[in-house]
Image: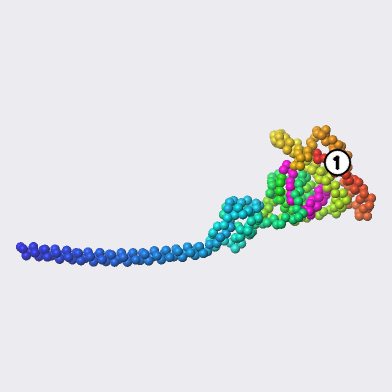
Amino acid sequence: MSRIRLRQKQLIVAGAIGGAIVLLLSVGTGYLYISKLQHKYKEHTSKIEQQLALAQKQLNEERSAITVVKENHLAGTILREEDLVTMSVPRAAIPDNAVDDLQKLIGKYPKIDLQKNTLITSPMLYEEGVTPNDLRNQEFKLIQLPFKLSTKDFVDVRIKFPTGQDYIVLSKKKVQDLNNGTIWYQMNEEEILLMSSAIVDAFINDATIYALSYVDPYMQEKAYVNYPPNAKVQELILTDPNIVNVATKYLEKRLREKLEQDIKSMPEDERQKYNSGKSNLNTNPSGSTYYEEGDEGNQGNGENSAQNNPLLDSTETPDFNAGSGSSGQDSAATNSEFKDYNETVPFEG
């Protein structure tokens, strides 16, 4: 009996030792396997970190500083230093015609509206150039203007004759200011003389001077000026420069009469809206009063002189196309007909 128990004990001990050995082998094998996995993971992680570092380095090396607009910027508005900011962008995203120099952008004008952080390219810009010495501000009240015209718009000033012929006198002029039918342009000497010729031409031939606005002025090219100045008109202007003032006043008066006729044909509610603001039309920007119907007492001798003015009352058109051989007496007659009348023509509303 004791031998059996001894043998059982020996078997138990041997089994325990075998189990312990197997357990140790399993733990050792597991440890080695896990260690190997950890080593591979560390190697893989290190490799990925190196690749990320290299990619970030390459990305940083391929970025460039570029100038963009700081906030939304309207087309035709000058770019100033405070409107621009420099930021870093990927080099691959920068087009070849991008303007990366801040100084090349200051003082330029965008052709289109620019959104915040917009990268600016050369075709987006234009510049007005150096201001010429003969540039002047000129105002007109005799031009028929588009109803929806506003400042900063661009227009062509045209002249239309009763024969149907239509010519461009001024091309792509920017509206500097606009107030109650009076418009301001910046014009050089050549444009001023050309416009003077057109005014006298319109006066003599009952033509109409009007303006047409551009649809997309910053993208459209300016029209070609094709108005041919009349040689006789130019000669008349040189002979008596006062004729330009007379013609201007007459065209202003004619345009005002047309306005009054249009107002009379307006519905009653629209006419009341006009009458409420009519006082604003009685005074021009320089402070001179425009008389209306029924104000005869305030006009003094001006109205009588206007009634006696052969330029306004005569139904016949002076002949400025006479031959050059009659430049003696005809020129004197022409001068006497136009001379000294410009001071006696008030602007009647």
Q: Which residues are magenta?
A: 179-204
Question: Residue at (74%, 56%) from the top-left corner?
Answer: 132
Is 202 in front, or is 127? 127
Q: Is residue 290 above or below residue 222?
A: above
Taking 312 as reference, is 30 left or right? Answer: left
From the top left corner, tell me how far across and down residue 6 is, in percent. 8, 64
At horizontal 71% and vertical 51% (from top left) the residue drawn is 174
Asked if 243 appears above or below 50 in the picture, the reply is: above
Q: For this view, does 34 lie left or right of residue 257?
A: left
- The overriding secondary structure of the stretch rendered in magenta is helix
> Which residue is label 1 attached to?
344
Task: Locate residue 108, reporting x and y percent.
Answer: 65, 56
User: Is 32 covered by the magenta stretch?
Assistant: no
Would you call the spot at circle 1 few (<14 residues within 10 Å), some (14-19), or many (20 or more)? some
Question: Is residue 183 within the magenta segment?
Answer: yes
Q: Residue at x 17, y 63 (%)?
A: 16
Name above or below for residue 297 compared with residue 45. above
